[in-house]
Image (cartoon, grey):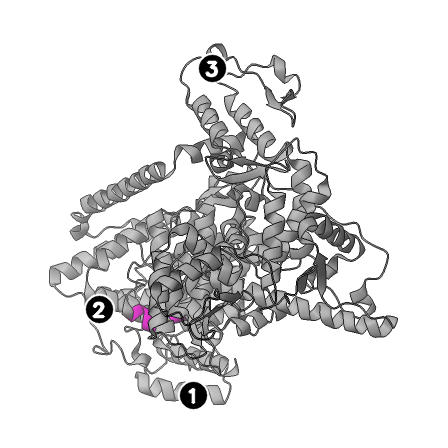
């Protein structure tokens, strides 16, 4: 910081000696604005600036009244050239008077005026110098392209030679207006009928927050459309593009220092104009910018205060998809370019790369702009159950420790400032997947990044604070580290407590169950743990089947989860209903099962995530949205209740007389567990209120709320309570979206056995070139879908691929003796297949099919 400050002071001395302070009445003999000052060339000025810095000579203050004099002042206080100290654009030390040095800021008209003169003379150097001077000056850029032209009386003056430009300007404006209209049409095409109905539903239910951030335009003083037109005209000239590039390189260090030390945005909110104008440059993604200017510019932008970042995000959210995508791709290309251009080793992490970190922080603004500009639903939030404060000291407090994340998951400051969450956006302008940067994920050391994330250190940046850039596989690894550390913490606390109490406690969560009474045994044991000490659920799980000798290193737990779910989801029990068309389960509203059963299901799902197990669960996406804190709405019926959804859609689309033709009221009828009809009023006296064209949207909204929320409120609250007993202290909510939570629990449905073959390891004398190994993979690839799932179940304990696909599954095939009639065996805890060296491919297939078909239980070999 001291070196940066020294550099900044030396540059200020240099500018004072070459440009002056702007005060025509300056009396400082060491300032170029002083009447008696003898001009210095740049080399002499640089040497003199160092001398002045050493003796700490007083600097002149910039003179605000003279910083932007009118065009008739004729004062010469700005340098003719840009970047002399960088060795660029130094051809003309004494340019002619046509360099327009009296221009202190730019307007669209002034640019076209100078451009017209340059085109007439076939010499663009005056405009290049003006662009370089203004775009390298923070003050000049702030004052340029302003909407409030009354502050700049000279902006309305036109050069005679520019009359021909006006028709083009108007045509360009029409073109931009047409682009906006096209954008609106694109948005209309992009917005499906389902989304339109969602917005109507949200407005009916009073969810005004869904559009609050987009209704009022963000007021900025810069004329963005004018800036875009100017860029369109000038960037076609290569020399102009070079001027913009050099100016940005010169501008950024000064802006960064201003933001770091002077709090310029607090005193002048128009300082944000600099970033608005620069980001409209459509060439920012070019290699020259990515290498020289953009890393510096991103560092500047990341130094903006939170209110400025939020304002910039809201402004960008009102841009077209085309503009938001361009900005996203610019920052993504910068991250990718930097990552592939550097080699990151243990001593040099990508977290320490200032360019990548700054670009990621800037990408976050575009991400939230993408969220704000999408289909928002900031209402429909589930009420969080708050546990009453206990007067008793907890075990952790007795031992001088505080529970991690005591107040829930952390909230991103920008997210809080904007008043919106990623979860609130049903359909962003750009798919979330496009914000994931795979090259970054490949070089990120997740164990180190997780450490930075947990300690929340300001000195180290964690990419988990920007989870949108990470893929689900990388984030699941971070969650795995968090879960393991939590397990070790519980183990250590138990050991310490044992010393304090003098009694031996179990450092693990041990479940001993009978295979024939698995639900009863699991329910009793887990219910006791949940009542006595829910923290025990965060211990490492060990399951033992009574009468079986399997030692749980992960495989026994997998079968335990699978057997519990098979029984709990059995339609004969009546806890869940099954839809044959969607192959999905839903909570049965009239279920007679007590809440403890649903709590057990929630605990099982939480334990599966916590212990890194994959479950064969078939829930619609609305269940995961509700687990993350959102209520179900009309849109969620599409996959959870497709028949009802289609009926309601037809009601909304009906063009006839709804009241006369359909004869529906605000009273609905359902059947109970025994098939008897029961009625429910969606609103008071609903049976007397007919559904009409005017109130049909309200009916659809209330009906959806009843089906997805109110009718299953008792069951779902118990289910979510069990889930949160295990996961409420993990970073699950702040890292994952609902579809990613489903992937964590259920794994991937895409079974790519060729990817599994590539990553499989061999032991005991086998290798990938052995005859039997080649026969084995030919046999497995020839299996049908069902047999492939049985093989995965036999080998790994689950028939699903982990997050990231089968390529992430490390399977081992080990030799288990010579040819024999014995069946292949497996260690599901270690994903190991023990395969005898059968003498023929046919025998291999017959033995393998028999093994995977009749495999169940754990016994000694």
- Farthest-out residue, front: 821
| Magenta span | 288-295
What's the residue at 61%, 36% (across, down)?
Answer: 572
Residue 133 x %, y %: 31, 68
Q: Tell me, for residue 97, which label it has, or none.
A: 2
Tell which circle, 3 or 1, labels the residue nearer the N-terminal end: 1
Q: Is residue 55 left or right of residue 283?
A: right
Q: Determine which quarter of the picture holds residue 205.
A: top right
Q: Earlier in the sequence, mark 3 or mark 2?
A: 2
Specify the farthest residue to the top.
660
SS of the residue under disc 1: helix
Query: Residue 243, percent across and down?
Result: 26, 68
Which numbered disc flags the more N-terminal residue, 2 or 1? Answer: 1
> Measured along the vertical axis of the image, is residue 819 above or below residue 635?
below
Q: Which residue is mark 1?
A: 50
Observer-side mark, 3 or 2, equals 3
In the rendered image, the vertical position of residue 716 relative to residue 537, given as above or below:
above
The circle on residue 529 is none
Instruction: Say whether residue 487 is magenta.
Output: no
Side of 431 relative to 602 (left or right): left
């Amino acid at each position: 910081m001291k070196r940066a400050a020294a550099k900044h002071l030396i540059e200020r001395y240099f500018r004072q000696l070459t440009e002056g302070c702007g005060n025509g009445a300056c009396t400082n003999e060491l300032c170029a604005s002083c009447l008696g000052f003898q001009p210095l060339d740049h080399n002499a000025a640089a040497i003199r600036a160092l001398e002045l810095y050493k003796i700490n000579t007083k600097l002149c203050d910039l003179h605000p009244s003279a910083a932007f004099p009118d065009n008739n002042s004729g004062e010469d206080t700005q340098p003719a050239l840009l970047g002399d100290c960088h060795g660029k654009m130094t051809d003309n030390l004494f340019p002619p008077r046509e360099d327009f040095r009296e221009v202190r800021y730019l307007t669209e008209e002034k640019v076209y005026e100078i451009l017209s003169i340059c085109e007439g003379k076939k010499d663009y150097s005056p405009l290049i110098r003006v662009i370089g001077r203004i775009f390298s000056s923070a003050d000049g850029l702030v004052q340029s392209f302003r909407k409030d032209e009354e502050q700049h009386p000279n902006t309305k003056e036109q050069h005679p030679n520019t009359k021909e430009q006006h028709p083009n300007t108007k045509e360009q404006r029409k073109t931009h207006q047409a682009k906006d209209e096209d954008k609106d049409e694109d948005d209309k095409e992009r917005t499906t009928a389902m989304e339109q109905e969602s917005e109507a539903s949200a407005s009916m239910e009073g969810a005004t927050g869904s559009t609050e951030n987009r209704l009022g335009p963000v007021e900025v003083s810069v004329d963005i459309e004018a800036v875009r037109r100017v860029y369109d005209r000038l960037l076609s000239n290569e020399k102009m593009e070079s001027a913009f590039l050099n100016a940005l390189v010169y501008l950024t260090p000064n802006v960064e220092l201003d933001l770091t030390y002077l709090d310029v945005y607090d005193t002048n909110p128009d300082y944000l104009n600099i970033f608005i104008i620069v980001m409209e440059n459509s060439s920012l993604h070019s290699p020259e910018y990515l290498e020289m200017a953009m890393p510096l510019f991103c560092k500047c932008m990341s130094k903006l205060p939170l209110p400025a970042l939020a304002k910039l995000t809201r402004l960008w959210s009102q841009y077209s998809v085309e503009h938001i995508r361009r900005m996203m791709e610019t920052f993504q290309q910068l991250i990718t370019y930097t990552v592939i251009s550097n080699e990151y080793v243990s001593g040099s992490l990508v977290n320490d790369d200032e360019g990548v970190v700054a670009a990621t922080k800037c990408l976050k603004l575009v991400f939230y702009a993408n969220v704000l500009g999408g289909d928002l639903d900031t209402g429909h939030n589930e009420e969080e159950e708050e546990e009453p404060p206990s007067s008793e000291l907890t075990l952790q407090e007795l031992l001088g420790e505080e529970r991690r994340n005591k107040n829930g998951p952390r909230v991103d400051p920008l997210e809080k400032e904007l008043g919106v969450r990623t979860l609130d956006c049903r359909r962003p302008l750009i798919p979330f997947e496009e914000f994931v940067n795979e090259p970054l994920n490949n070089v990120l050391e997740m164990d180190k990044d997780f450490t930075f994330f947990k300690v929340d250190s300001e000195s180290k940046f964690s990419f988990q604070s920007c989870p949108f850039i990470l893929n689900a596989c990388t984030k699941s690894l971070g969650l795995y580290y968090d879960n393991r550390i939590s397990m070790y913490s519980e183990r250590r606390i138990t050991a310490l407590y044992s010393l304090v109490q003098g009694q031996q406690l179990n450092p693990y969560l041990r479940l001993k169950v009978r295979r024939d009474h698995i639900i009863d045994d699991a329910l009793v044991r887990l219910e006791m743990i949940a009542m006595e000490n829910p923290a025990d659920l965060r211990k490492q799980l060990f399951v033992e089947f009574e009468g079986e000798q399997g030692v749980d290193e992960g495989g026994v737990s997998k079968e335990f989860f699978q057997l519990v779910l098979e029984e709990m989801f059995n339609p004969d029990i009546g806890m869940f209903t099954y839809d044959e068309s969607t192959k999905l389960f839903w909570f049965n509203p009239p279920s007679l099962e007590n809440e403890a059963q649903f709590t057990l299901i929630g605990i099982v799902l939480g334990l599966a995530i916590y212990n890194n197990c994959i479950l064969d669960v078939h829930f619609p996406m609305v269940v995961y949205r509700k687990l993350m804190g959102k209520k179900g709405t009309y849109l969620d019926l599409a996959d959870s209740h497709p028949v009802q959804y289609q009926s309601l859609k037809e009601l909304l689309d009906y063009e006839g007389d709804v009241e006369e033709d359909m004869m529906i009221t605000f009273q609905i009828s359902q059947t109970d567990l025994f098939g008897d009809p029961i009625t429910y009023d969606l609103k008071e006296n609903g049976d007397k209120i007919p559904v009409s064209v005017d109130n049909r949207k309200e009916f659809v909204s209330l009906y959806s709320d009843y089906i997805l929320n109110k009718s299953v409120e008792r069951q779902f609250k118990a289910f979510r309570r069990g889930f949160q007993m295990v996961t409420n202290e993990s970073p699950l909510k702040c890292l994952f979206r609902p579809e990613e939570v489903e992937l964590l629990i259920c794994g991937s449905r895409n079974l790519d056995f060729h990817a599994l073959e590539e990553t499989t390891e061999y032991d005991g004398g086998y290798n990938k070139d052995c005859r039997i190994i080649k026969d084995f993979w030919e046999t497995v690839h020839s299996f049908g879908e069902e047999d492939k799932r049985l093989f995965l179940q036999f080998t790994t304990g689950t028939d699903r691929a982990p997050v990231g696909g089968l390529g992430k599954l490390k399977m081992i095939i080990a030799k288990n003796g010579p040819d024999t009639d014995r069946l292949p065996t497996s260690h599901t805890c270690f994903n190991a297949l023990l395969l005898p060296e059968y003498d023929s491919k046919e025998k291999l297939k017959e033995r393998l099919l028999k093994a995977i078909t009749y495999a169940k239980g754990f016994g000694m070999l």
